[in-house]
Image (cartoon, rainbow, N blue to C red):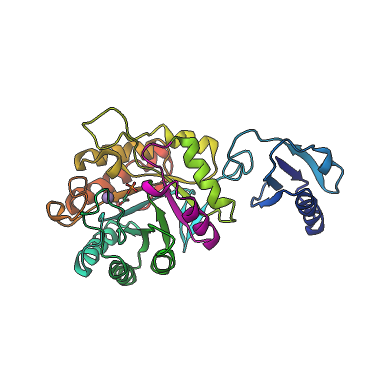
Amino acid sequence: MLILLKTDASRQEIETVKNRVAELGFTPHEIPGVQRVAIGITGNKAKVSPDNFLTLPGVVDVISVSKPFKLVGRDFKPENTIVDVGGVTFGGNEIQIIAGPCSVESREQILEAAMLVKQSGAKLLRGGAFKPRTSPYAFQGLKVEGLEYLKDAAEKTGLKVVTEVKDTETLAAVAECSDILQIGARNMYNFSLLEKVGDLGKPVLLKRGFSSTIEELLMAAEYILSRGNYNVILCERGIRTFETYTRNTLDLNAVPLIKKLSHLPVIVDPSHGTGAWDLVPPMAQAAIAAGADGLMIEVHAHPEKAMSDGYQSLSPKTFLAMTKQLKKFESVIQRAVAVDA
Ligand code: PEP
Ligand code: MN
């Protein structure tokens, strides 16, 4: 349920409504926005009578919201959310490119990747330090040491860091070295981790689970927003289907569909979405044509030597060729691609 107040509602009128919601045993959420003053209600098991609020000063309407997600939905917040990562924005006119290796492998390797990303004009560096691998025998990442190398590479280049947080135990350490906390596909249902990143308030990149519906992805994001953190970027990274020629099936339907259902920015990861380096540039183009607010691309100086996901990683040459190609889309999509021409 959503309570709409007049646009010039006073602080006292807003607080009166929030207190009334709390008195009834529900949770009030003041929805950030410029077009209207709105308070969302969660925690109600059944329909709440609008009469509880319609007589309060400043209230103009009470709307019932039937979708299971509330705070992430466009019903609650019609305008796009812009996630601001120290001046680098997602969800506005600029399309951001996050690029880097699957895993941080050494100080030199991540620095070399960072210089390449910088050279392309992109603003965000990725690299996994804590790697959630399918096999316990596979490379698990350099962990805290990897975080330090990432931080060092970011400081030297001025890039923002995106790295995965695997569990609540290592959250504090990852948060210290990362500008955006990535929740991977395998952790989309880790509700205690979602709640903890919600409490922290830092920008979160939430990846779709490989067998998750779009509604389940939105409900996972709802966990984060319900703790007061609206800085959530959603990521389509491919889902499992019967197709075996690709690692996953990149579900580009998700982009315009999520943009319709939710105000949150959506980015696409064609590297995991396809699993093959030569399919990455065309699917990156398709993603931005479909309305994606950004891309996450795996790139490695020597893909054949990568400790994880080498086959889907672009070489420096193909990465730079791809970013230049993406730049040409600007005039058609009427948005800026945050790379150099
Ligand atoms: C990654 O981005 O390196 C990763 C592990 O992705 P996903 O969680 O989508 O598999
Ligand atoms: Mn990877």
Count the numbered circles shown.
0
> Relative to residue 45, is residue 145 drawn left or right?
left
- Residue 119 visible to an observer of this rendering: yes
Q: Nearer the viewer, residue 83 or 130?
A: 130
> Relative to residue 310, is residue 70 drawn left or right?
right
Magenta run includes residue 198 = yes
Identified at 78% across, 48% down, the residue is: 24
Q: Is residue 99 above or below residue 150?
A: above
Magenta run includes residue 125 = no
Identified at 21% across, 52% down, the residue is: 308
The x, y position of residue 120, in whole percent, is 27, 56
Q: Is residue 235 above or below residue 164?
A: above
- Residue 81 visible to an observer of this rendering: no
- The magenta stretch is 186-212
The x, y position of residue 224, in whole percent, is 53, 52
| Furthest-front residue in this view | 136
| Furthest-top residue in this view | 242
| Furthest-left residue in this view | 304
The x, y position of residue 151, in whole percent, is 33, 69
